[in-house]
Image (spheres, coloured by chain):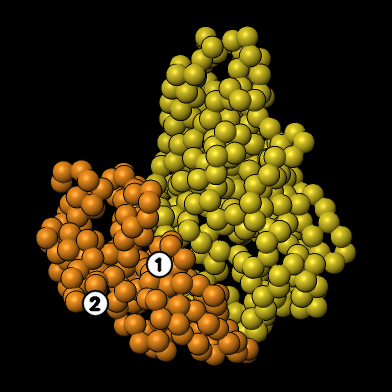
Chain colours: A orange, B yellow
Amino acid sequence: MSTHPIQLTINGRRHDATVEGRLVLSDFLRGDAGYTGVHVGCEHGVCGACTVIVDGLAVRSCLMLAVQADGAAITTVEGLAADDGTLHPVQQTMRDEHGLQCGFCTPGIVMTLAALTGGPNKANSETLLNALSGHICRCTGYQGIRRAALKLAGDAA
Amino acid sequence: MKPAPFDYLVPSTIEEACAQLAEAGGGATLLAGGQTLMPLLALRMSQPFILIDINRIKALKGATRVDGGTRIGPMMRQNEVIADPTLARELPVLVTAAQHVGHHQTRNRGTIGGSIALGEPAAELPATAVALGASVEVRSTRGSRRIAATDLYLGPYATALEPEEMITAIHFPDWPDDSISLFREVAQRPGDFALVGLTGAVTVKDGCIARAGIAWFGMGPTPIRARQVEAALLGQPIADLDLAGLAELAVADTAPFDDLHATAEYRRTVGRRIFARTLGERLNRNGP
Ligand code: FES
Ligand code: FES
């Protein structure tokens, strides 16, 4: 068993930690760094609830080791809304379109949509809908989430 | 659902990684994109003593044109394969295959080399390597060697790689610019494993098939090269192909099995159907 010093940025704040090699990133973000908006459903890459943005890309944080995030910039759902509480466009759209019920799957879905609509090359509706296949939602039946994705792509829902 | 303890090593060069593999004498596992290995660790189906993370080795990344082909670094992410302009031009069917691997989020981490080294029989990338005549360059402290993709797969998740060897490149031979891609996958949902999948390419010269590289995934214990139909296609005028007869030959090399999701007979039937449909459609659309 090995331990490793890591240094990374989470939601713009620098974090220094020493982690066991086997610690997965999702557990580090929740347990060590306190970002409990990172939801952990299956813990083996199936459900998508743990999705965060690592260096600009949406990834499943249960499928990365914390030590692999050394030097990375991570955004969790806590990093999206403005300081005054104004929701991020993806959050606002999910809310407007009733894209959530219990909210367990929601942070993951929001992070996928934020990663794909946040950069200079905004994804089209086909890409967004395809990316939703990486998430399981047990509540909504997906229609509200689909509408939110289409609206974010600029297509009428 | 937490991995068992291991020692984590993170080499920055291929030489360092090979030395660590040799020293571990079979007790180490390489961590590429982790989209299969991390679940296996979480479920404790895999409990290596040493995990060697090859994500920080720069020499394993990117695709370059080499004499007669394209050399792809095994640590190229599947989404990088999809976005790469060189690969879109040179190996369009590989790009299409990569689009069918897992989900957007797993493709941001998952690598081409990881998938090819794993040898999942229902996976898109190993079968595409087999179809297009690719080979892998492998290294250990004892030296390097090339293994043809057709010789790489011995059974489900079993490859000709020695425990101390690692893939350092994947070589795809050139296919002419006007090659016609063949790709079709039948799965229950996008991102699921294929029930039946067809991949490969053909080229047409003077109205006749001049070259064919075709393989199946999800149709047996390994990716399966459809050698009989490849041979039958060569020299055939595309104007009057016997699609039904060829489809029969196309599944002749397969060895599908029954599982929860489909019977072997279903897989063969769907295989014949998608072979005939894909070849027919693609030749009409891109015919001379
Ligand atoms: S908790 Fe990571 S994918 Fe389910
Ligand atoms: S809102 Fe409950 S799981 Fe998606």
Q: Residues within 10 Å of mark 1 (few under 14, many from 20)?
A: many
Q: Amino acid at mark 1?
A: Ile
> Residue B20: x, y in percent?
77, 75
Give the left or right position of residue B23, taking residue B255 as reference: right
Do the residues at discs 2 and 1 belong to one chain?
Answer: yes
Give the CA distance from mark 2 to mark 1: 19 Å
User: Residue drawn at (59%, 39%), measured in percent from left and top?
Assistant: B86
Dot 1 falls on which chain?
A
The residue pinned by badge 2 equals A83
The residue pinned by badge 1 equals A53
Q: Residues within 10 Å of mark 2 (few under 14, many from 20)?
A: few
Residue nearer the viewer, B234 or A16? A16
Distance from mark 1 CB to nearest ligand 1 atom below 8 Å: no
Dot 2 falls on which chain?
A
User: Residue drawn at (29%, 50%), measured in percent from left and top?
Assistant: A129
Visible in this render: residue A94? no
User: Tag 1, which secondary structure?
Assistant: strand
> Residue A131: x, y in percent?
35, 54
Above or below: residue B58 compared with residue B215: below
Above or below: residue B257 compared with residue B6: above
Residue nearer the viewer, B111 or B156? B111
Q: Can you name the residue that lies furthest to the front here? A: A84
Visible in this render: residue A46? yes
Q: Quadrant of residue A45?
A: bottom left
Pointers 2 and 1 in contact (C-beta within 8 Å): no
Nearer the camera: disc 2 or disc 1: 2
User: Residue drawn at (41%, 42%), measured in percent from left and top?
Assistant: B186
